[in-house]
């Protein structure tokens, strides 16, 4: 692929999401001199019969070259149906027996995530929460992890004092954690819930960048 100049159709970034190649080009209509552009045009490509074929409509957005790739949207991982039945008792493994009361209480709430799951949560120390994912249809538990708050200096530097540690929706398979899983590898995680398998990390951004 051949792109244009830095301010006129040049390649800004490229990344993969949901089996599509997404490419952002500098928007020529928002060019600033010859050096850059204040906007981007996003084009989606699907691999088909040995070629990348453009798919869907193009998008325009504001561009800040200091930022990494844009994070996935909940709408990109939407589910059509939300389970409304009575949840069974959760099947609690040995490793989680010390927090079984919190799991049982959370598992009997309304569906919170990905169409038919709940996310029971509990405290695990200062500025920390633990969680698991429970299937509201079967009671099966999928391992979660401890989510510790991002270091104060990172939050202060970026001005994200109101950033949520965990974000999820009943009608989306996307789970966002803005934290330090098990007190290490701090950053922004975007995970997809895969039925019968559990959480799969779709993207990660180091919070220090």
Image: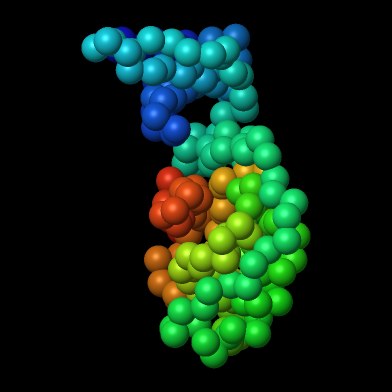
Q: Picture coordinates of residue 110 (x, y %)? A: 75, 60
- Please indicate whether residue 45 sits to the left or right of residue 144 in the image: left
Mark yes or no: residue 40 visible.
Answer: yes
Name the foreground residue: 80 vs 209: 80
Q: Picture coordinates of residue 103 (x, y %)? A: 62, 77
Report the quarter where the N terminus lies: top left
Q: Total label count?
A: 0
Residue furthest toward the left?
Answer: 50
How did the renderer colour the structure? rainbow
Q: Please say if 206 is above or below 92.
A: above
Q: Residue shown at 49%/34% (left/top)?
A: 65
Q: Residue shown at 58%/34% (left/top)?
A: 76
Q: Picture coordinates of residue 22 (x, y %)? A: 44, 25
Q: Please say if 41 is above or below 71.
A: above
Q: Please say if 96 is above or below 43.
A: below
- Please indicate whether residue 127 sits to the left or right of residue 201 in the image: right
Residue furthest toward the bottom?
Answer: 98
Q: Residue shown at 50%/82% (left/top)?
A: 96
Image quarter for residue 59?
top right
Q: Residue shown at 40%/66% (left/top)?
A: 185
Q: Picture coordinates of residue 187 (x, y %)? A: 48, 59
Name the foreground residue: 153 vs 48: 48
Mark yes or no: residue 157 visible.
Answer: no
């Amino acid at each position: 692929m051949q792109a244009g100049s830095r301010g006129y159709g040049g390649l800004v970034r490229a990344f993969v999401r949901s089996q599509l190649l997404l490419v952002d080009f500098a928007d020529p209509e928002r060019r600033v001199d010859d050096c850059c552009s204040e906007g981007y045009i996003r084009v989606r490509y699907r691999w088909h019969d040995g070629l990348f074929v453009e798919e869907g409509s193009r998008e325009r957005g504001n561009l800040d070259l200091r930022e990494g790739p844009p994070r996935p949207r909940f709408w990109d991982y939407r589910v059509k149906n939300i389970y409304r039945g009575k949840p069974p008792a959760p099947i609690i493994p040995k490793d989680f027996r010390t927090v079984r009361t919190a799991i049982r209480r959370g598992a009997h709430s309304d569906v919170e995530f990905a169409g038919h799951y709940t996310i029971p949560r509990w405290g695990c120390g200062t500025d920390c929460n633990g969680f698991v994912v429970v299937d509201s249809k079967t009671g099966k538990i999928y391992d979660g992890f401890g989510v510790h708050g991002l270091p104060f200096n990172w939050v202060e530097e970026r001005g994200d004092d109101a950033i949520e540690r965990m974000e999820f929706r009943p009608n989306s398979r996307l789970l966002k954690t803005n934290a330090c899983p098990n007190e290490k590898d701090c950053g922004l995680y975007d995970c997809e819930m895969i039925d019968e398998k559990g959480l799969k990390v779709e993207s990660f951004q180091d919070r220090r960048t």
